[in-house]
Image (spheres, helix red, strand yellow):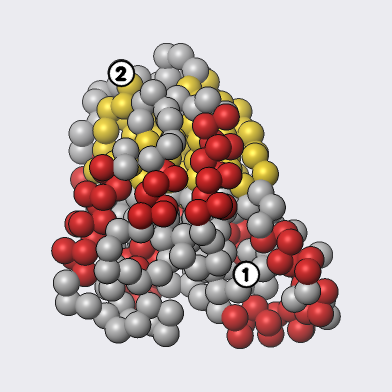
Amino acid sequence: MSASRLRGPILTRRRVLRGLAGGGLGVGLLGGVGAAQAYRFGMTRHTHALPGLTRPLRVAFLTDLHYGLFIYGGSVRAWVDAANAARPDLIVLGGDQMDYRADEPPAGLLAELRRLKAPLGVYGVWGNHDYGSVGKYHSPHYGPARDDWPQRRERLRVAYGEAGVTILRNQGRAVREDLYLAGVDDLWEGEVDLRAALAGKPGGGATLLVSHNPDLLPDLTPGIGLTLCGHTHGGQIRLPLIGAPVVPSRYGQRYAMGWVTGAHGTPAYISRGLGLSGVPLRSLCEPEVAVFALKPE
């Protein structure tokens, strides 16, 4: 499926400001309230049964850090501290870790991610802004596209690995004898291959899938116990009674945030994320570090 056909509306400064003005709340949100909400985050805790587990599992999910655009080391440090304090067995990054064009890997971001601690490891996937950051496409924020973006992506993958973060691009790992973790490429800018991501799955045990973009959910295959997604930021700007004027999904509000259901009845959680995109504002959409207490069914 082509990226252009799958794209939803993009969260841009002009679109958000137009939506706020239409809702009659632009003045308040564009002042200190929206900015203050942008940098306060919370811990959300979820308990869910995961078929195939033989013993409990705690997973911390951090997504959409957007380091380099309104977000710097201090914010990431606080998120890492919160994740570590939850004492997770496994930590997962949901994509859009960085959001700026740089010739070298993001040293400040990697220094903080290196501090993440989990006995089963730290894993991540790519998001569309990660691809912009390595030069795959042109934008006013990133500048011109670069022919060497695949090599830059590989250098970034290696740098993450040296910082203790394994990037899964259509790959999976048996991180415990009863748990297979799979990660797919970004739906908009990468090449999703769900079959390849699941190819190494053993016959038994649980399957946890990570996809940056929730628009993959209608195309899931059977046998996935839980899917974690980011990308939408919950809309980032939400208005009373209306919800989010803009959700970057072809399905609109359906996959904006929270618990949803994908194909074959697969449960999925869409995080509101942690960083900011387009504008340095949030409203009624607190950033979150999500912690999942998964238990045998």
x and y percent of residue 260 in the render?
Answer: 57, 47
Of the residues shown, which amino acid type is indicated by label 2? Glu
Under circle 2, the secondary element is loop
Seen at 19% across and 57% down, the residue is 154
x and y percent of residue 259 in the render?
Answer: 60, 44
For label 2, the crowd category at 10 Å Cα-Cα, with few meaning under 14, some 14 to 19 and many 20 or more, is few
Q: Verify CB contact (< 8 Å) between mark 1 and mark 2.
A: no
Seen at 79% across and 66% down, the residue is 33
Q: Name the residue under label 2.
A: 177
Image quadrant in which you'd find residue 25: bottom right
Q: Is residue 148 toward the left or the right of residue 4 in the image?
A: left
For label 1, the crowd category at 10 Å Cα-Cα, with few meaning under 14, some 14 to 19 and many 20 or more, is some
Q: Is residue 291 toward the left or the right of residue 189 in the image?
A: right
Inspect this view and state whether residue 276 appears.
Answer: yes
Inspect this view and state whether residue 182 appears.
Answer: no
Counting every numbered tag in the picture gives: 2
Q: Name the residue under label 1.
A: 280
Seen at 72% across and 59% down, the residue is 37
